[in-house]
Image (cartoon, rainbow, N blue to C red):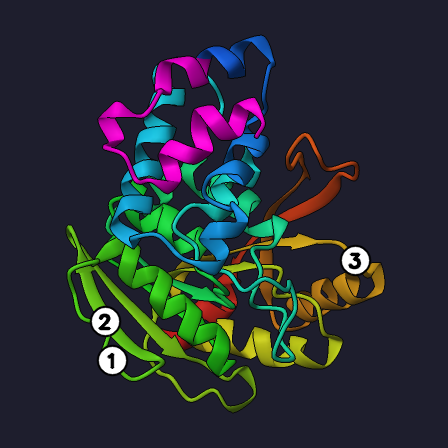
Amino acid sequence: MTNIECEYTRPFLHMIKITDFPWQGLISHFTDGHISQNEFIDATIFHPQVESFPLNEEYLKLFLKRYIQELEDKNIEVYESVYDRLFLKRPRNLITEGTTGLTTWQASHILADYCLENSCLFKSKSVLELGSGLGLTGLLLVKSLDLNSYTFTDHHSKVLEFLQHNVTINLSPKQENNSEIGEYSTKYNNTSVQIQCLDWEAFHYSQKYDIILGADVVFDRRLIPHLINVVLKSLNRRGKAIFASTIRNVDTYNYFLHKLEEKKLKIECTEERKHKGSLSQTDVSIVKIITFQIEEEIRTTQE
């Protein structure tokens, strides 16, 4: 048995009291480079035995919270790959059931960071997120910002099932998750939270939102006109849409920009960010952030 298994895996699997876990020794090992954060997570939360015989969910939640607190108290940055795993129920395969929504894409991290950096835009606002996937972006924002409401949306039933699970255990763990898939609502502090099934191609909602968010929603040229239609019908006259996109196909992204212009959606600002990922990742992705709103002349006709 390795040192990391003796020192950390065994007490974790035995679910010893959180306060009795050897946190001080762990931080020292991180500081001197003896073990990495990923090695520790793989030896505990993602240990094969946990995969086969899951531990108590409340214990896992408390363990992860204490882990983050210990690092933050020592001014040690938590790897983004660790955040990937925080309270997010994920299937083992990245793409399953014929959908890409069952993974946490890089753009969702970038979008969440951007929103948190510009928190003043969100105060008391209603937010609609398109293609929420597993809910990473929304969970971070609901827990961190002073929002009026936040609506998660997706279309695939399996994605909605996982999304509803994640929202429940993060925002209302004591609430019974017995709502129909895609018809969930709860309250977190002062923020109203909903999950809705939204089909861009058969869109009929009439509710308006102050801010619309989307991470990696520009991926299929055929769906882009429907996506823009959803934005036009859902965005308040003076609202903003903020999209973060990993550029996998330049032609598709340029087509999206062309359609924005065609539909009189004014681009306010764009910027590029690199997704650092974890130290184990060798590639660096470029994510483009774009903020846009309805042009003044269109607003006037709406009024």
Tell whether label 1 touches label 3 (CB within 8 Å). no
Tell whether label 2 touches label 1 (CB within 8 Å). yes
Q: Foreground residue, 158 or 107?
A: 158
Residue for point 35% across, 69% down: 164
Tell whether label 2 touches label 3 (CB within 8 Å). no
Which numbered tag is attached to residue 179?
Answer: 1
Residue for point 25% across, 50% down: 58
Location of the N terminus by quadrant is top right
Q: Amino acid at mark 3?
A: Arg
Instruction: From this view, report whether residue 141 is shown above or below residue 243.
Output: above
Q: Secondary structure at mark 2?
A: strand
Q: Foreground residue, 189 or 301?
A: 189
Q: Amino acid at mark 1?
A: Ser
**C-alpha distance separating marks 3 and 1:** 36 Å
Q: Between disc 1 and disc 2, whose residue precedes? A: 1
Which numbered tag is attached to residue 185?
Answer: 2
Indicate the position of residue 169 as horizontal and vertical percent values: 28, 58
Write the start and end of the magenta stretch as one range. 1-27
Q: Secondary structure at mark 3?
A: loop
User: Tag 1: Cα neighbours inside 10 Å, few (<14), some, or many (≥20)?
Assistant: few
Asked if residue 234 shows in the view, the reply is no
Which numbered tag is attached to residue 248?
Answer: 3
**C-alpha distance separating marks 1 and 2:** 8 Å
Q: Is residue 167 left or right of residue 284?
A: left
Q: Foreground residue, 265 or 75?
A: 75
Instruction: From this view, report whether residue 105 is shown above or below residue 82.
Output: below
Nearest to the eye among marks 3 and 1: give it.
1
Is 5 a magenta residue? yes
Q: Magenta span: helix, strand or loop, mainly? A: helix
Location of the C terminus by quadrant is bottom left
Is 303 a magenta residue? no
